[in-house]
Image: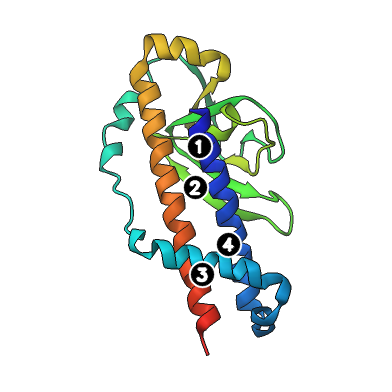
Amino acid sequence: MRHLGNRIQNMANDYNESKALLEQLKASEAAKANKNLFSKIKKHIDMYQNNKNKLNEPSADSLNTVSEALADNGKGKYKDYRKGMIVFKEGAVDSSMYILHKGSVGMYINYRTREEEKVAEYEAVTFFGEMGIISDEPRGAAAIVESDNTRVETISVEDLDSIFRDNPEKISAILRHMSYRLRKLNIDFLKTCKEITELYNKK
């Protein structure tokens, strides 16, 4: 699980770098001639050229039965939230992940500032905040409840042994979700590389 999590984290970093580079290219034609950016631009062009045949969206069919494995069985650590409540803050460090059993949760950077940006939204049943259980890095975004009567289960590192023993299907479901997210993140990264390539080559 930790190895898969590290791959997701590395891919997320690459994707964020590619998005920042794309914004620089969109903002200024002069960015194409910037020597400091050229090596980054070339890296993304090469990445797209070498992997453009892998741009098919990953199938979500394997996730169709995941909600059953993640079902609320009353044995976990559950909490009910109202709209606007905070599950965790950006920059927080903890060793937990969360299963969203009911309602919705949005992920925000720079929450409640002028630079506030919503970067993701999750609907039940799914999980979020998984990097907390496999990484010691601070949270990259705040998790904010988007609807009343939202129900969230907390899974800490200490809970994993008992879940492996008592509910291995839940562990399998988590791993399938993480694998899907890695594939989806890789596709999003390649799509951004494609945009960078087309924008750079545009006359």
In the image, taking residue 54 as reference, residue 189 lies left or right, namely: right
Residue at the spot x=71%, y=78% of the render? 34
Q: Which mark is residue 148?
A: 1
Q: Read off the residue under disc 2.
A: 121
Which of disc 3 and disc 1 is earlier in sequence?
3
Residue 129 visible to an observer of this rendering: no
Tag 3: residue type? Ile
Task: Name the secondary structure under disc 1.
Answer: loop
Q: Read off the residue under disc 3.
A: 45
Residue at the spot x=72%, y=39% of the render? 91
Tag 1: residue type? Asp
Q: Where does residue 100 sit, x and y in percent of width and height?
A: 46, 32
Classify 10 Å Cα crowding around label 2: few (below 14), some (14-19), many (20 and above).
Answer: some
In the image, taking residue 78 as reference, residue 140 lies left or right, namely: right
Which of disc 3 and disc 4 is earlier in sequence?
4
C-alpha separation, residue under disc 1 versus residue under disc 3: 45 Å
Task: Name the secondary structure under disc 3.
Answer: helix
Q: Read off the residue under disc 4.
A: 18
Classify 10 Å Cα crowding around label 4: few (below 14), some (14-19), many (20 and above).
Answer: many
- Between 14 and 154, which is closer to the camera in this rendering? 14
Q: Where does residue 88 sit, x and y in percent of width and height?
A: 64, 34
Where residue 26 sits, quadrant-wise, is: bottom right
Task: Name the secondary structure under disc 2.
Answer: strand
Q: Is residue 165 above or below residue 124?
A: above
C-alpha separation, residue under disc 4 versus residue under disc 3: 11 Å
C-alpha separation, residue under disc 4 versus residue under disc 2: 21 Å
